């Protein structure tokens, strides 16, 4: 039995449809993904471009009957107490944006990853991206309980978990994305798999392949992952292409292979041959060589290449020989989250490239200018592209209600076609549900139907999550979002900002005002009860969070340390109870590196 048939039978029972109600499934391939639901009170016909879209059609059909998929894992599936038979009468054709996905970040357990993969097609997403060659870095952070001294370190079986992940992706016919950063370290013969330092540089006989900076070749900051290469060296280009070819041969299950450079900037090679060409031109030379090798080997693997750091600057002399092999990924990591693509000035230009002296663009309009420059430079050779964005990578921790970041996601996705992009993938913590999972819900629902308004998504989500308290909770969290500032939390601007203190004070007053009311909220429904329990904990967390932020904004470092100690203990003590909602490792890391707290 196909997985979409299994899920249909399971959900049919949960919804309470009669046993004799049947669905006929059919695959009718087209150039772009789609599904059609044609149903009445006697039965239904689901037609789709492939089996993965048939699965999404099953979830959508049941969604129309009232099922809501409110978070990762079945504990967040909510089934209707009753449904109107008229909802069986459907004739819908859905043609979503082409690239709709999530990339792993943070500290994650086996269950976190598998639950997220299970959730993706339920909300209309079609891609999952495991950074690096395997998920070791993200699993290790959780099982070592980095950042939480109250939890003992645990062992985990990387190979077994990775095999389960691959099976889960294949079962749902999701697009399987892998690697990204790490190729430069592989070319250098390094053993470090993530952002770790290589302990012994002398063990490598390939340091001559590293970028020369100030006359020296070696690991940049001691981290191979952050080290660029001498990309004009033909030997380096060949070894890079061979690394990609070998991986693609050994991993046919990976249909979208990300080929990126180092994860740091202002560290490109200054040798005589490299300095006469911008990094992007050398990067395209390597990509074309990879394409040649994959073609010769008969491999159809799609290569995802990126606009990121120095690679924001478009090529000057090179182009892609076979653009159909490639997918362009626009990664504006330094962007602001106070405004979105809708309000951007699209007439802006880009600054000149100065080797190892670049500054990353913050404004959304400046980032879009780079995208336009790339599209113009490649012209008809510009391949399919998507945004790889960071709404849930760091900035969401600065939005205490998760409402602003949800609305911004909706607005940004709506702008994708006007930017010449065919979708969006978030680089995000999988454990981003504090106090709710609305941002990812909006991600999936809007990518499936860009015209689906944020207001409608917000209303249906809160009604399902909080029942009779939906409007009250929504107003409360909207206030918290309005009074907190993602960009400031994310390290943009000075740390001492007395002008923002009034907003955070108002947020704290709202948290304390709502506490007695939140403690009164009760529900017999298990899904609503879970969300109310999270909300109760979030209210207490929010008090300690806001006191910590207020001290920082006012320049009271002694107060920061005192308030943060309470916040830190609160997070550590409650992590296991709310593990899937709040990534304690990651919020610690972001606060330390960007907010400058802890």
Image (cartoon, helix red, strand yellow):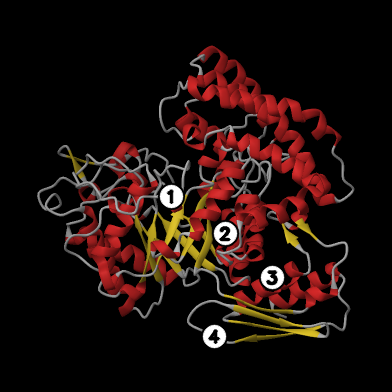
Q: Is residue 490 left or right of residue 15?
A: left
> Badge 2: few (under 14), some or many (20 or more) residues near its Cα, within 10 Å?
some
Q: Position of residue 340 (x, y in %)?
A: 46, 49
Earlier-in-chain disc, 4 versus 1: 4
Earlier-in-chain disc, 4 versus 2: 4
Label for residue 343?
1
Identify the residue shown where x is 68% and y is 55%. 72
Q: Would you name the residue on which mark 2 appears?
A: 162
Q: Is residue 412 left or right of residue 186?
A: right
Label for residue 373?
none
Earlier-in-chain disc, 3 versus 4: 4
Identify the residue shown where x is 45% and y is 31%. 593
Residue 204 appears anywhere in the view? yes
Look at the numbered disc 2 and give the secondary structure of its residue: helix
Earlier-in-chain disc, 2 versus 1: 2
Q: Quadrant of residue 533?
A: top right
> Badge 1: few (under 14), some or many (20 or more) residues near its Cα, within 10 Å?
few
Look at the numbered disc 4 and give the secondary structure of its residue: loop
Earlier-in-chain disc, 1 versus 3: 3
Q: Is residue 394 left or right of residue 123?
A: left
Q: CA distance from mark 2 to mark 1?
A: 41 Å
Query: Which of the two residues, 471 or 196, is positioned nearer the viewer here?
Result: 471
Q: Would you name the residue on which mark 3 appears?
A: 60
Query: Which of the two residues, 451 or 79, is positioned nearer the viewer here?
Result: 451
Q: Would you name the residue on which mark 4 appears?
A: 29
């Amino acid at each position: 039995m196909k997985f979409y048939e299994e899920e249909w039978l399971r959900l049919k029972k949960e919804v309470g449809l009669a046993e004799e109600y049947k669905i006929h499934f059919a695959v009718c391939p087209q150039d772009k993904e789609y599904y059609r639901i044609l149903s009445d009170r006697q039965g239904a016909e689901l037609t789709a471009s492939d089996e993965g879209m048939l699965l999404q059609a099953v979830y959508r059909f049941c969604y129309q009957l009232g099922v809501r998929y409110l978070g990762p894992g079945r504990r967040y599936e909510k089934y209707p107490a009753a449904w109107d038979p008229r909802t069986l009468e459907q004739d819908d054709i859905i043609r979503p944006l082409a690239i709709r996905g999530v990339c792993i970040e943070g500290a994650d357990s086996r269950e976190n990853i598998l639950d997220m993969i299970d959730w993706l097609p339920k909300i209309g997403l079609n891609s999952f991206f495991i950074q690096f060659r395997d998920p070791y870095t993200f699993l290790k952070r959780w099982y070592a309980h980095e950042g939480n001294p109250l939890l003992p370190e645990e062992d985990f079986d990387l190979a077994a978990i990775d095999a389960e992940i691959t099976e889960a992706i294949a079962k749902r016919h999701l697009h399987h994305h892998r690697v990204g950063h790490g190729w430069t370290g592989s070319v250098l013969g390094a053993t470090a798999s993530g952002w770790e330092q290589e302990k012994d540089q002398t063990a490598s006989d390939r340091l001559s392949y590293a970028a020369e900076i100030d006359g020296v070749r070696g690991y940049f900051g001691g981290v191979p992952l952050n080290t660029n290469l001498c990309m004009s060296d033909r030997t380096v280009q060949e070894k890079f292409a061979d690394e990609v070819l070998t991986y693609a041969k050994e991993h046919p299950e990976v249909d979208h292979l990300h080929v990126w450079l180092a994860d740091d900037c202002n560290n490109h090679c200054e040798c005589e041959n490299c300095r006469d060409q911008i990094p992007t031109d050398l990067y395209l030379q390597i990509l074309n060589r990879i394409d040649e090798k994959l073609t010769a080997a008969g491999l159809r693997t799609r290569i995802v290449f990126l606009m990121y750091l120095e690679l924001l600057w478009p090529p000057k002399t090179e182009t892609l020989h076979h653009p159909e092999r490639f997918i362009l990924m626009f990664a504006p990591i330094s962007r602001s989250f106070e405004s979105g693509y809708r309000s951007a000035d699209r007439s802006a230009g880009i600054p000149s490239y100065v080797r190892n002296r670049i500054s990353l663009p913050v404004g959304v309009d400046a980032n879009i200018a780079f995208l336009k420059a790339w599209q113009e430079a490649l012209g008809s050779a510009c391949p399919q592209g998507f945004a790889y964005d960071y709404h849930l990578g760091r900035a969401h921790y600065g939005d205490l209600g998760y409402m602003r970041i949800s609305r911004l996601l909706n607005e940004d996705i709506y702008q994708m076609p006007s930017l010449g992009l065919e979708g969006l993938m978030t680089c995000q913590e999988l454990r981003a549900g504090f106090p709710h999972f609305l941002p990812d819900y909006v991600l999936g629902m809007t990518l499936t139907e860009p015209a689906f308004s944020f207001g409608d998504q917000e209303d249906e989500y809160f009604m399902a999550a909080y029942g009779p308290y939906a409007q009250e909770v929504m107003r409360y969290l909207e206030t918290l979002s309005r009074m907190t500032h993602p960009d400031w939390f994310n390290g943009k601007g000075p740390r001492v900002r007395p002008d923002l203190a009034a907003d955070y004070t108002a947020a704290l007053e709202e948290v304390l005002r709502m506490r007695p009311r939140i403690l009164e909220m009760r529900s017999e429904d298990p899904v609503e009860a879970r969300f109310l329990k999270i909300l109760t904990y979030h209210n207490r967390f929010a008090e300690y969070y806001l006191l910590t932020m207020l001290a920082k904004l006012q320049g009271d470092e002694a107060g920061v340390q005192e308030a943060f100690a309470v916040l830190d203990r609160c997070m550590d003590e409650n992590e296991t109870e709310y593990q899937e909602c709040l990534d304690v490792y990651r919020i610690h890391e972001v606060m330390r590196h960007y907010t400058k707290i802890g």
